Amino acid sequence: MSPEEFRRQGHAAIDWIADYWASLDELPVRSQLAPGDVRRLLPASAPEDAEPFDAVLDDLDRVVVPGLTHWQHPRFFAYFPANSSPAAILGDLLSSGIGAQGMIWATSPAVTEVEQVVLDWFAEALRLPEAFRSDGPGGGVIQDTASTATFTALLSALHRASGGEARVSGVGGTQWRVYGSTQAHSSLVKAAMMAGLGEDAVRTIDVDPATQAMDVDALRDAMAEDVEAGLRPVMVQAACGSTSTGAMDDVAAIAEVAREWGAWLHVDAAWAGVAAVCPEHRDHLAGVEAADSFVTNPHKWLLTTFDCSTFWVRDRKALTGALSILPEYLRNAATESGEVVDYRDWHPQLGRRFRAIKLWAVLRTYGVSGLREHVRHGIALAGHVADLVAGDDRFEMVTEPALSLVVFRLRAGDEQTLAAMEAVNASGEAYLSHTTVNGVAAIRLAVGSWRTTLADVDRTWRALQEAAVSHG
Amino acid sequence: MSPEEFRRQGHAAIDWIADYWASLDELPVRSQLAPGDVRRLLPASAPEDAEPFDAVLDDLDRVVVPGLTHWQHPRFFAYFPANSSPAAILGDLLSSGIGAQGMIWATSPAVTEVEQVVLDWFAEALRLPEAFRSDGPGGGVIQDTASTATFTALLSALHRASGGEARVSGVGGTQWRVYGSTQAHSSLVKAAMMAGLGEDAVRTIDVDPATQAMDVDALRDAMAEDVEAGLRPVMVQAACGSTSTGAMDDVAAIAEVAREWGAWLHVDAAWAGVAAVCPEHRDHLAGVEAADSFVTNPHKWLLTTFDCSTFWVRDRKALTGALSILPEYLRNAATESGEVVDYRDWHPQLGRRFRAIKLWAVLRTYGVSGLREHVRHGIALAGHVADLVAGDDRFEMVTEPALSLVVFRLRAGDEQTLAAMEAVNASGEAYLSHTTVNGVAAIRLAVGSWRTTLADVDRTWRALQEAAVSHG
Ligand SMILES: Cc1ncc(COP(=O)(O)O)c(C=O)c1O
Ligand SMILES: Cc1ncc(COP(=O)(O)O)c(C=O)c1O
């Protein structure tokens, strides 16, 4: 592709995206295809000879779009959002064009330093503790996902608790224990599996049935019991905004218990943490001052195209101690001076693209005030949904609304609830997901997109009401 | 940003990239900045109010470009390349615009199925074993990096060797052993650390001093000795194209030894594997038919913007067995039918963007023939460098050229070799990296960019010759 050709095709790709977005409202939210439908439309082998880039664009319309569930659709309410935005897309495009690989400071100083600055900015916007800023012993890094953040938190915890032994001789000698509530995200168990502790090392603590928050007394008892039995608590995970219902654990109370046994406290605020840009939602994070690490995902609610998970630690030495490796070919004067940070020691990967540009672009082109507005917009729409639920006798709330997440059900029962949801999903009108709360089935409606309007919410509600007639 | 504004700014971002590329030849390859220089140019806090996107573009020129080491520069010869290309950039841009999150098949069938097809295409283009194709018990997945691929290979190996026990009760009960040569990439040790085995679990096997390939007899002895001592071999890594010198391990011979002890065989061809698109370079992978897993990085030499690491396994059950987790909110009919693949069980992360579009775009817009041409271009230029080395008495080759990598030194000694390299790097004229081979310092020159011409190589060589006058 010549430079002129790149400009031409690049403009065409930008226009394709703008047109795709303009068409979203007309598309079924959930893909209507069956397994194999996409594969069948593609040839068995790569072409021997070059095809024009336009052929790729054509196939996006022909093959890909029908096979998409449209996460950027204004009536996508399932799971948690994975919001994309113009600023983030263009920021990441620029990262691709620059094509720098920032495994160490020396291989592109700007990749590292812009990331440090942007994470400091964001920590300040969320009013995270000073200890997480890059000018002290802590610091932030962009992980790909919260799963990776939680995994690296656990590796850091093991490093600290073992006095550096774990990285040398493994985790075998000690019977480590990890704690989270029954509502902790599945990435906690996955982290324990990957770190070599196994699922059995995770002790799940009951929650208060009403709030779905961790029962801190139960945590205290469990830890004491485990220690008594010769097990060694290494990490406690507190959830600010659980996946199922947006439940908020009491971080301050959990911190106190974790401290008693010297366990690492990791706060998983993957979805809800970004709401702390609003002063009125900062209290969900109360107690984070005592956390050893904290993660929240701008790639969920905060307009930063997947992937972008912001992760901070109080003491970066625990993290880099667990992960650092210095082969000869990466030795360099800057690293040896100790004046720089080499991000390859902050995550499992070695190579890394210029991760910070898209978050930098989002923070600047929305401004913190624009991000507050975005968060408040989602929360207001969720409040409206809660009102609609309250106004229809066939429905009931299952938990209190949590920020922009509403969890409700049909009073008629589990089967009816799931059938109504499936009817809406199958129609393509909107897309919702389900969960189980205290043993009963529930529908989750998570608002997130900046495209979602009051009319979208109302339209989704009408679809649910109609489904309730058939299934309720 | 309105749709019109997105189009306008999107076109501006594309043009910025084209202009940046056009300017590369005039820029110093290695950033000339000192630690803190970039940070100092940025404000202490995120802006309260929105800034126009143009302000971000302006800061790229003012703050970022001087802080970059230009990996896309035609005279970037350090490490291994991280080639970007127009097709890949635009492919990934489209992925951002679509903004689908493909954690499971159901959340966007096309994300999964296009990836399966593209990995089948690529496996065929590299003539990888049938067993790696998606229509049998194996399959491929795009990992972010080779480090992650190697880590997941090790988790799969542990799963298989432990009969599923490792994921449940951890890796503690057994004294596992992992094998690689002294030239194995550092990600192998990092994988052992992350998996809870510790660095000490990796036994490094000596290499033949001439070829730098693993001494397979030494491997056989080491494994026998370990088994005798009660240790349990779990994985052997063979390197096709070592980081230091591009050394090629004898995969077939290693496979035989690994099989004796039932150890998983992982082939790390992160850099060199893509050369197998050329029939004349396929023999480096001889023996891969016996491998349990294989990784190569299109994001290195093969024009696919970072990150994109293609990873295949012979038996996907070992991989998903090690990593699968199924919380209630991800339960769905397609998964339960067993007819689909859910990629969240193939890697540490849960969420994932539409990873395959950029590789799809590369394979199509170059065609396999275009990729062959690209690989041959790099190898021819490296051959030219080897001739230049042979033609100047002050220099000598340290190892035979390996594909597009040339490793050489100044006969005068280590200090002179490193000083000459540093002089070239500091001048900004070209960028090279160093290594140590059999205890002596050497310069690595890895050709990779499609922008690199004979003139670029000659200019770099002249710079080295001048530096040799001062330092030789
Ligand atoms: C509370 C919580 N933690 C972690 C995650 C995992 O996110 P990721 O896909 O970034 O790993 C999720 C995803 O929904 C989540 O809700
Ligand atoms: C042989 C080899 N394996 C693995 C890697 C790690 O690559 P990645 O950055 O994709 O993890 C490299 C990087 O240079 C390499 O040369």
Image (tube, coloured by chain):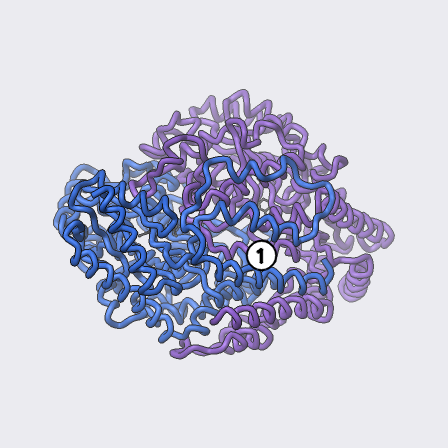
Chain colours: A purple, B blue
Pointer 1 chain: B
Q: How many other residues sit within 10 Å of disc 1, few (<14), some (14-19) or many (≥20)?
A: some
Question: With B423 as the anchor, is A112 left or right in this view?
Answer: right
Quarter location, residue B301? bottom left
Residue where numbered disc 1 is placed: B331
Residue at 26%, 61% in the rendered image: B382
Q: Give the camera-side residue of A118 and B15.
A: B15
Toward which corner of the image does residue A122 lie, by quadrant? top right
| Residue at 40% from the left image edge and 76% from the top image edge | A45
User: Does residue A238 show up?
Assistant: yes
Judge by depth and name the residue closer to the eye, B396 or A174. Answer: B396
Kindly state the secondary structure of the residue where label 1 is placed: loop
| Residue B96 picture location, percent across and down | 58, 60
Question: Could you say which is closer to the camera, residue A218 or residue B323?
Answer: B323
Whether A198 is drawn above or below B26: the answer is above
Horizontal side of A433 relative to B235 (left or right) equals: right
Residue sitting at x 49%, y 74%: A39
Q: Is residue A176 visible?
A: no
Name the amino acid, label 1: Arg
Give the percent coordinates (x, y) of residue B168.
42, 43
Compared to B31, does B104 lie above or below?
Answer: below
Residue B35: % across, % down: 47, 36
